[in-house]
Amino acid sequence: MRESRFRRDFLLVSGLNDSTPPDFREAPRALGILLLMVLVSATGLLQIIEAAFLAAGAMILTGCITASRARRSVDLPVLVVIAASFALGTAITETGGAEWVATSLLGLFGPLMPWLALVYILTAMFTEAITNNAAAVLMFPIALAVSEQLGVNFLPFAVAVMFAASASFITPLGYQTNLMVYSPGRYKLMDYVRLGFPLSLLVGSTAIGLIPFVWAC
């Protein structure tokens, strides 16, 4: 009875919709596949995407996960957003939209605006609303256009986009790991806001303060 209750609670907390109980005997095998994937990628034998696909296939072939559960684990909305963001980022670059945005912003605020901070803040806002990949793809051409309009080195702006796109702490939407713990941990949106907002301010102020010195314009 205790095992039955444990299985029911596990399924409830993890948000799984099928009645197949987890087989913890497969955990060592799954961890071994994960370690092998990391080693193969780290040593350069395969690209990370290739190693991940092979590891996913190995998980199914060895019985660590069923094919039906693997299909349900694919977050199609996130994939669609990422794919669409790449297309949108290309369109912004090819049509001159990024340069138009940069010119408009410069005309509105002038060259004295702390543009590095603005690029960081805009990227951080995007990454909290969509995903880190989509935010980086959308902001990269705009950051490039801003640096060209100002006549300064692009590298600090690229690093600012990189840091800001990775600093998703305020919502569970911006990064996959945030969503992974959202349901099992029974968190609420305000938990992320309460703890993530001060952390975002700390990371943002540190990054904006140090980037111009480490990656000088």
Image (cartoon, grey):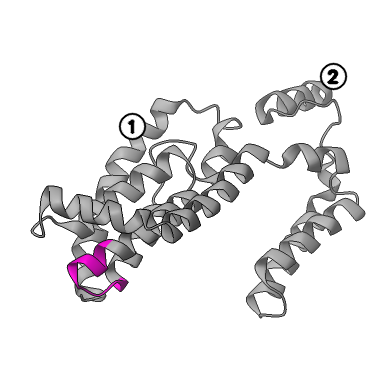
Give the side of residue 112 with respect to residue 25, left or right.
Answer: left
What residue appears at the point 72 percent right and 61 percent down from the top-left corner?
52
Is 93 rendered above or below residue 194? below
Q: Please identify the quadrant where the C terminus is shown.
A: bottom left
Nearest the viewer among 70 and 133 is: 133
> Start and end of the magenta stretch?
146-155
Q: Position of residue 179 (x, y in %)?
A: 56, 38
Amino acid residing under circle 2: Met
- Residue underneath mark 2: 1
Q: Quadrant of residue 12?
A: top right
What residue appears at the point 41 percent right and 34 percent down from the top-left corner?
192
Amino acid residing under circle 1: Arg
Q: Position of residue 94 (x, y in %)?
A: 45, 60
What residue appears at the point 85 percent right and 47 percent down from the top-left corner?
25
Magenta run includes residue 60: no
Q: Please identify the quadrant where the N terminus is shown.
A: top right
Q: Quadrant of residue 3?
A: top right
- Residue underneath mark 1: 194
Choose mark 2 or mark 1, whichever is in front. 1
Res 202 seen here: yes
